[in-house]
Amino acid sequence: MSAAPAPSDHVEDRASWTPMIGLFLAQVLMSFNVAALPISLGGMVEDFGVAPTVASSTIVVYGLAVAALVMTGAKLGQRIGWVVIFRIVLIVFAGSSLLMIFSRTVAWAIAGQILAGAAAAIIVPALVALIAENYRGSQQAAAVGSLGSARAFSGMSAFLIGGTLGTLVGWRPIFFITLGLAVIVFALSFKLRSDKGDPTIRIDLVASVLIGGAIVLLTMGFNNLNAWGIVSAEDGAPFSIAGLSPAPVFVVVGVVLGQAFFMWTRRRVAKGKVPLVDISVLARPTERAAVYAMFVIVAMEAAVNFTVPTYIQVVQGRTPFDTSMAMLPFNLTVFVTATLIVRFYKRYSPRTIALFSFGLTTVALVWLAFVVTNNWETLPTILGLIVFGIGQGALVTLVFNVLVTAAPKHLAGDVGSIRGTAQNLASAVGTAVMGAVLVTTLSAGITGAVEDHPELPEELVAQVDLDNINFTSNDELKEVLSTTTATQAQIDEAVELNAQQRLRTLKLGFLILAGISVAAALPASRLPKYRPDEIPDPAK
């Protein structure tokens, strides 16, 4: 009788990988959707007749919905049961794909991504919790690591497949893939170990409102810095506060609400009540450093994934396939690195790997700032994207691994919700801030350059709205100028000036990202430095 449990333990340690296929594809589903959005920007701009920054709102609202709802989603999963709620949100994700496919206006597309984000807010913690439920030991470690490679694989395949479809057919068929993935994952979910949930769990509504409000305000504030004004309210601002733009006010209030969330959570824990998220998983400096590092690297990735496709498709007027080819070196490198980096965990500490990886991203971004040209197929540009991809791929997998290994298994859902909040808020903020920085820099650069070019007289400049400058192609600029009194020589001069300022803005954007990468060395230096053969004890 005493030997009876042994076979059961053995079977559990070597569980079937079939359930993991569904979880892997669920991560692919979310990541493919996110990666497909930048590729679709050019098509949405053309179909809906909106500015690139408006079309990029689909990226922002997705990340906003995930980040705002993921902690509440984790508690819903614990209450209802992870498998049941996992299936429900897969249906919601399928509905979001249908909205994207049949969207008539950009509002439809934005609504579709809000639905996708709300579904992902539950899928993100569900993946970690279901892995902990279905796998043990080395299988669990391998399963967690596969989520990083799934994310990288999705980015690579989305740019390849999406770029091809976007060029030959259009941007809408790209979302037939997300629809198909949702159906497949739903079918495979019946292989997952079932759980009944715990109906006695109560959701802390006050904490939900505080963290949701904080993230909404932070994202809206950052996303509208350019449109509403960085300090003084612009004409596009919905309202002003004593002449002050609401954007920075939203950011400040968002930070205050975030602090209030942590204060409320600590107070609730002190009273012995269940919090919305167990912040004990961030009790040690090493775990907090992992979250900070994750935020920085995801924000930088989002900024690059917004900048490059926007520049290639909108500015250069090239096809989505051209975009996929330009981004292929980066996405392929991220995928390979995210898959292979685990081999170095036995030799080097997380701190060493992180510092080296941030060093690579810094060097790559500085290099790109100096070598990038209007031709993305140059060898120096490709090398820069490859080096950045190595650092990116290593960091995303590393910091998530640090969080998972540092937390007890029963807190897997909390780790997943914190990961989702950090990653998606970083993605939304990275996209929004980069868009605001580039447009503001471009506007200032063109305004200054016009003043230095007397061949562009004031009466001609007055016919062009310099207050609403955005990234436009040379053909679009020529079309606008053709409606003015500009001569052919003046049109040619204006197009050349615009092209120079766009490239200057792009280079400056890479330099700004390089500065952020350097600053990330601070949290990276606080990551664990345990010996390679040590296994961190989450109980300590």
Image (tube, grey):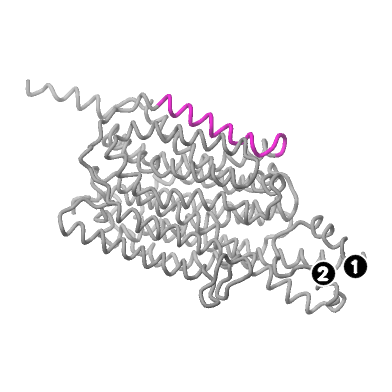
Q: Secondary structure at mark 1?
A: loop
What number of labels is visible? 2
Give yes or no for residue 180 being in the magenta stretch: yes
Q: Residues within 10 Å of mark 1 (few under 14, many from 20)?
A: few
Quadrant of the rendering where the N terminus is positioned:
top left
Q: What's the amino acid at mark 1?
A: Thr
Answer whether residue 494 is visible to the viewer in this image.
yes
Depth check: give the residue in front, 369 or 206: 206
Q: Which badge, 1 or 2, is on the more N-terminal residue?
A: 2
* Residue displayed at 37% across by 68% down: 256
- The secondary structure that most of the magenta stretch takes on is helix
Give yes or no for residue 98 being in the magenta stretch: no
Q: Which residue is mark 1?
A: 485
Numbered label attached to residue 536: none
Q: What's the amino acid at mark 2?
A: Gln
Q: Which residue is mark 2?
A: 463
* Residue displayed at 16% across by 25% down: 6
Image quadrant where residue 449 sits: bottom right
* Residue displayed at 35% across by 34% down: 85
Side of 194 where 97 appears, left or right: right
Q: x, y percentage for residue 164?
A: 67, 37
